[in-house]
Every structure is written in C-alpha cells, then in structure tokens.
Image (tube, rainbow, N blue to C red):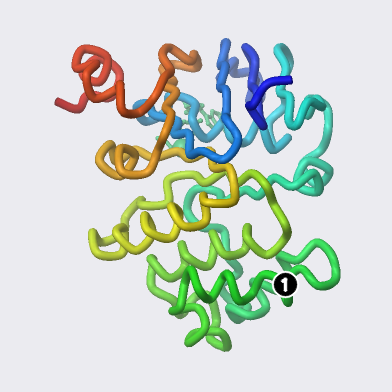
Amino acid sequence: MSDNILEVRDIHTFIGQFHILEGVSVSVPSGAITVLLGRNGAGKTTTLRSIMGLNQVTQGDISYMNGSLVGKNAHKIAQLGIGYVPEHRAIFKELSVRENLQIAARKKGDLENNLDFVFELFPDLKRLIELPGGNLSGGQQQMLAIARALVPDNGLLLIDEPSEGLAPIIIQQLIAAIRTLAANKTVLLVEQNFRVASLLADYFVIIDDGHSVASGSMADLHKEHELVQRYLGVA
Ligand SMILES: Nc1ncnc2c1ncn2[C@@H]1O[C@H](COP(=O)(O)OP(=O)(O)OP(=O)(O)O)[C@@H](O)[C@H]1O
Ligand SMILES: [Mg+2]
C-alpha cells in the first residue's frame, strides 16, 4: 500500500474528438497539499475533471484509496469523499449562503456537524448567511465555494484556481484558510500564481500540453530555475 490517497497513472482524456490529456500522472500524498502547475490550456482543469468523472478517461488508471475511479460517474466519485471546487466558483447566486451550504450536504447531519468549522475558517460567511450568493464579493464567493466542499465529510479536496481574480489581501486570507483546512484533509490544487503555489503546496506536478512533465517537492522547485522558466514562464 502506498501513502498516496490518490494516484493518477498515465491517463488519456478526450473532450469530443480532441485528445486533451496524453499521459498525465499525478501522485497525491495523504495529508499534504499538491499543486498542479502549467500554462493556460495545459490540461490542469481537465485533469481535475477527469478525476471527478466529468471528463471521460480512455486510457490509464486513477486509484483513490486503492480503488479505481475510472468508469465511475461524478456522483459516485463525490460520494467516495472527494470534494470539487471548480474554476470560476460555481455557487448558486440566487440562493442564500445558507441554502448553498445546505444543498452541498450529502447526508443528514453533514451541515450541522461541519458548520462550526466552516465559520471558524471563513467568519465572513456567518455574517452573510442569509444573503444571496450573488451579493457576495468575489473573495466571499470563493470562500463559499470552498465551504461547500467542506460540508460533506470529504477526505480529499480538488480546488481549481482559488486565487484567480482576487485582491492580495483576500488571497492572504484564502491561503491561511486552505492551510488550516489542510491540517486534516488532503488537497490537490490548481494555482497559476506561482507565489501563492509556493506558499501553499508541499508537492508539485507540472503539466504541459496534456503531459505531466515534472514533479517533486515544492521546496526543490525553487532551485529548478530552468524548469520554472521553461514551463511556467516565471523568472
Ligand atoms: N469543452 C472543450 N472543448 C474543446 N476543447 C477544450 C474544452 N475544454 C478544454 N479544452 C481544451 O483542452 C485544453 C486543456 O484545457 P484545460 O481547461 O484543462 O487547461 P488549463 O490548464 O486548466 O488552462 P487554464 O490555466 O487556462 O485554466 C485546452 O487546449 C483547451 O482549449
Ligand atoms: Mg483551468
């Protein structure tokens, strides 16, 4: 048995007729934060969607707690304890914060059991609980999107670009919250902001043009100037 809660092995994914992932492997160690890095269009979101069963994997394997996810539908995969926070914060804008949280529950007691933790992590949400999601600021909507994934007892969270479009001060709050929640959950993150990724992640995987091309510990990546420059375009 490995210490990796999730193991993506050489997956291939098509979207329609397009061969988008052509060999992506990602090891996600339990209890740590792993970040997927790579340019726009590299295949980071498609990797998360493939894990969630939202894009169909035609080759390779995805094993989660030593069982295969390939061929399971998204509903079934979520029930196994994987929470997905998509790009662009898919919250229900017409529903209140409370209703957004309520419908994220998978079983009776989920919300009651986890609401204190959600409020501890995101105190703003407590104050805004009766407001429509659409009235929240971008940062508050991102907090709500993450909070929704904390309502069921998920062991693994997949979070796509949490810092996108947010002000630095809000990003600081999010970083603190993600670090706190990662104390008892495993996180697989997509993050384009290299500085944010550096502050958060323990491990990285670089995806380029549908392939995973490098992986290792985030602390080591800082010494790999050539790698960072070539695939991420950051000096
Ligand atoms: N619905 C779709 N139909 C056709 N091509 C798609 C579709 N969704 C994504 N793609 C293509 O798949 C490739 C990978 O997209 P993906 O969204 O996974 O990239 P990404 O690394 O998340 O990029 P970004 O940083 O811009 O979010 C891109 O070339 C994109 O144009
Ligand atoms: Mg993306």
Q: How many labels does the image show?
A: 1
| Quarter of the image with the N terminus in it | top right
Could you say which is closer to the camera, residue 33 or residue 49? Answer: 33
Q: Quadrant of residue 82?
A: top right
Three-letter residue code for mark 1:
Asn
Which residue lies at the image location 78% right of the left edge and 29% below the top edge? Answer: 69
Residue at (47%, 72%) from the top-left corner?
122
Q: In this view, does 142 lie to the left or right of 80?
A: left
Q: Which residue is drawn at 52% across and 35% down?
A: 45
Question: What is the x, y in percent for residue 146?
Answer: 54, 59
Q: Position of residue 112 (x, y in %)?
A: 73, 77
Could you tell me which secondary element the residue under label 1 belongs to?
Answer: helix
Quarter holding the C terminus is top left
- Relative to 90, is 11 above or below? above
Q: Where is residue 144 in the image (x, y as percent from the top left)?
A: 53, 67
Residue wearing tag 1: 113
In the picture, measured across the screen, residue 147 lies left or right of residue 108, that is left
Q: In this view, does 174 lie above or below 96?
A: above
Position in image of residue 162 (x %, y %): 42, 51
Look at 44% across and 79% down and name the residue there.
124
